[in-house]
């Protein structure tokens, strides 16, 4: 009798232990309300994050016929350009410091390949641009001035990030013929490596508002310049793509 009672007790204990362990080891499922889905991040948002520092530094500032700069806008970090056309005014041989350093590297690397690329004019104040624009209006007419020049406040030169370049092969002139020179071809192919783009590209006239200018380069930083080169973007298109306000 005692043995039977003991056996029953053992069986009961084993059954209880099995049920208890099964409950402890059974897989658990996370309640649906605790599942956190990671938000989708677009390529545009990733790129914008990568360019945030350059955006904050103002390297993607837009100055065109639709977006004008204040009359008093003047970069605080202008630096002298050391490679320039000797017959042009020394007053406008300045760019923002990072852009100036980048241009010096560009010019020196071109020189190492036997090419001379120099600036003719860089930063222009609002007042100087006003004199230039209205001078064209008086001598060449309003239509010509609007096609080839910028009204004061709408010129990229006021940003301190733009430069007109030339070479002895075109007598340091600003001419479309520059695109066919060795210097013009080299600049078009390599400017992005130094953070520059050909600002007014052929085929982008309706977007930029200006005729093709193979001599006019604009500093946007190396990351942005690479993207613009790969996607064949004008600056306006990049800004729209990244939704930069």
Image (cartoon, helix red, strand yellow):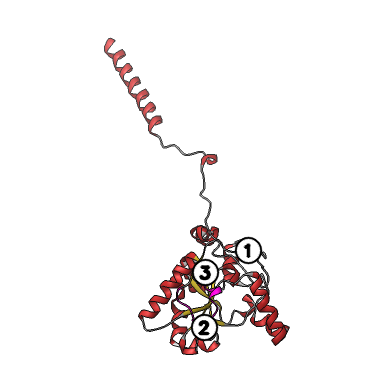
Q: Do the CB atoms of the residues marked 1 and 2 lie less than 8 Å apart?
A: no
Q: Secondary structure at mark 1?
A: loop
The residue pinned by badge 3 equals: 95
Residue at (48%, 78%) from the top-left corner?
A: 84
The residue pinned by badge 1 equals: 73
Task: Specify few, some or many for label 1: CA neighbours under 10 Å numbering under 14, 14-19, or 20 or more.
Answer: few
What is the magenta segment's predominant secondary structure? loop
Q: Do the CB atoms of the residues marked 3 and 2 lie less than 8 Å apart?
A: no
Distance (Cα) linking label 3 and label 2: 18 Å
Identify the mark nearer the N-term, 3 or 2: 2
Identify the mark nearer the N-term, 1 or 2: 1
Residue at (49%, 68%) from the top-left corner?
A: 99
Identify the mark nearer the N-term, 3 or 1: 1
Observer-side mark, 3 or 2, equals: 2
In this rendering, position of residue 19 left or right of residue 125:
left
Q: Secondary structure at mark 2?
A: loop
Considering depth in this image, is 121 or 183 the residue closer to the camera?
121
Distance (Cα) linking label 1 and label 2: 27 Å
Residue at (44%, 71%) from the top-left corner?
A: 194
Write the start and end of the magenta stretch as one range: 82-94
The residue pinned by badge 2 equals: 87
Total number of numbered discs in the rendering? 3
Q: Kindly give the residue lying farthest to the left in the view shown.
A: 3
Q: Position of residue 50 (x, y in %)?
A: 48, 59
The circle drawn on residue 183 is: none
Indicate whether 229 appears above or below 202. above
Q: Position of residue 43 (x, y in %)?
A: 51, 61
């Amino acid at each position: 009798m005692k043995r039977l009672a003991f056996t029953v007790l053992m069986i009961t204990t084993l059954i209880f232990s099995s049920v208890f362990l099964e409950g402890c080891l059974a897989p658990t499922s996370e309640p649906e309300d605790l599942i956190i889905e990671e938000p989708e991040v677009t390529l545009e948002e990733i790129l914008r994050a990568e360019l945030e520092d350059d955006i904050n530094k103002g390297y993607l500032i837009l100055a065109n016929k639709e977006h004008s700069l204040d009359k008093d806008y003047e970069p605080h970090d202008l630096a002298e350009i050391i490679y320039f056309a000797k017959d042009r005014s020394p007053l406008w041989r300045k760019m923002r410091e990072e852009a100036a350093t980048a241009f010096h590297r560009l010019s020196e690397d071109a020189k190492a390949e036997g090419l001379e690329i120099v600036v003719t004019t860089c930063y222009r104040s609002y007042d100087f641009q006003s004199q230039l624009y209205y001078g064209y209006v008086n001598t060449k007419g309003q239509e010509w001035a609007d096609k080839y020049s910028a009204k004061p406040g709408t010129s990229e030169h006021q940003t301190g990030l733009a430069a007109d370049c030339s070479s002895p092969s075109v007598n340091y002139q600003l001419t479309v013929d520059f695109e066919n020179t060795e210097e013009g071809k080299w600049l078009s192919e390599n400017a992005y490596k130094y953070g520059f783009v050909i600002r007014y590209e052929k085929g982008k006239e309706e977007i930029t508002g200006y005729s093709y200018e193979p001599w006019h380069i604009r500093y946007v930083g190396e990351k942005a310049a690479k993207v613009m080169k790969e996607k064949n973007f004008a600056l306006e298109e990049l800004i729209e793509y990244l939704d930069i306000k």
